[in-house]
Amino acid sequence: MTSIRQSFSREAPDARRQSLIDATANVLAEYGAAGTSVRAICREAGVSSGLLRHYYPTIEAAIEAAYRFTGMRVQAALDDAVAVAVTPRTRLLAYITASFAPPISDPKLLSTWLAFWSLTKTSPAIASVHGEIYSEYRRVMEMLIADLMPHKKDHRLTAVALTALVDGLWLELSLDNAPFTAQEAAAIAEHYLDILIT
C-alpha cells in the first residue's frame, strides 16, 4: 500500500504555494470561512498539513495570501478591460463595467469574496488586505475619473459612490438570479456615471 506521503507529486515551490492559494480559495468558496480548516485546504490541494504549515504558519496566513492573490486577479481583469478602451470616458466605463462580466462576475468568486469579507471583522490581517485591495481599486478609479474630469480637484467621493454602485450590482449579478442582465447593469452604471460627472 502506497503511503499518502509517497503519492504527493513534487512541484516547484512557487507552484506549490500557488496550489495552496487556489485550494484555500476553493475551500472558502465551498464551505465559507467557518468550514475552512487546515485539513480541508490540504485535502483540496492533495498535500500534507506539514506542507501547508511550511508555506503558511497559520490558516490566517493562507487565507490572507488567497485574498491578496484573488484581489490581484480581479485587478488584472479590470486593467485588461481598461487597456482596450481609448477615451477617458470609455476607459472609466470599462473599469466600472468589467465587474459585470466573467471572470469577475462569477458565483464561485462571489462565494470566496463573501468569505473574505466575513473575516474582516475578526482578523486584523484580513482587514488589512481588504483595505489594500479596495484602496487600490479606488485609487485607479480616482485616476480614471481625474482623466475624464481634470477640472475637478477631488474625485474621492465620486469614486466611493461608483464603487458602492458597482459592488451592489456585481453582488446581485453574481448571485445568479438578478432581476437585471449584465448589459442592464452596465447601462445603470453608465447612467449614474453621467449624473455624477456633470
Image (cartoon, helix red, strand yellow):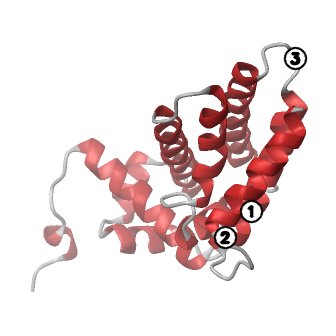
Using the numbered discs, state the Cα–Cα distance from disc 2 to disc 1 in whole angstroms: 6 Å
For marks 3 and 1, the one nearer the N-term is 3
The vertical placement of 175 against 114, above or below, is below
Q: In the visual, does 100 lie left or right of 7?
A: right
Q: Of tags 3 and 1, which is closer to the observer? A: 3
Q: Of tags 3 and 2, which is closer to the observer? A: 3
Please state the horizontal and vertical placement of residue 154, each as a whole percent of the image.
Answer: 88, 20
Q: Image point 59% across, 42% down: which residue?
A: 94
Quadrant the N terminus occupies: bottom left
Q: Amino acid at mark 2?
A: Leu
Labels 3 & 2 near each other (Cβ < 8 A): no
Labels 2 & 1 near each other (Cβ < 8 A): yes
Query: Badge 1: how crowded within 10 Å, few (<14), some, or many (20+)?
Result: many
Where is mark 3, residue-wise? 152
Q: Image point 15% across, 72% down: which residue?
A: 7
Residue 33 can be seen, yes or no: no
Query: Badge 3: how crowded within 10 Å, few (<14), some, or many (20+)?
Result: few
Q: Amino acid at mark 3?
A: Lys
Quadrant the C terminus occupies: top right
Q: Which mark is residue 173?
A: 2
Q: Amino acid at mark 1?
A: Leu
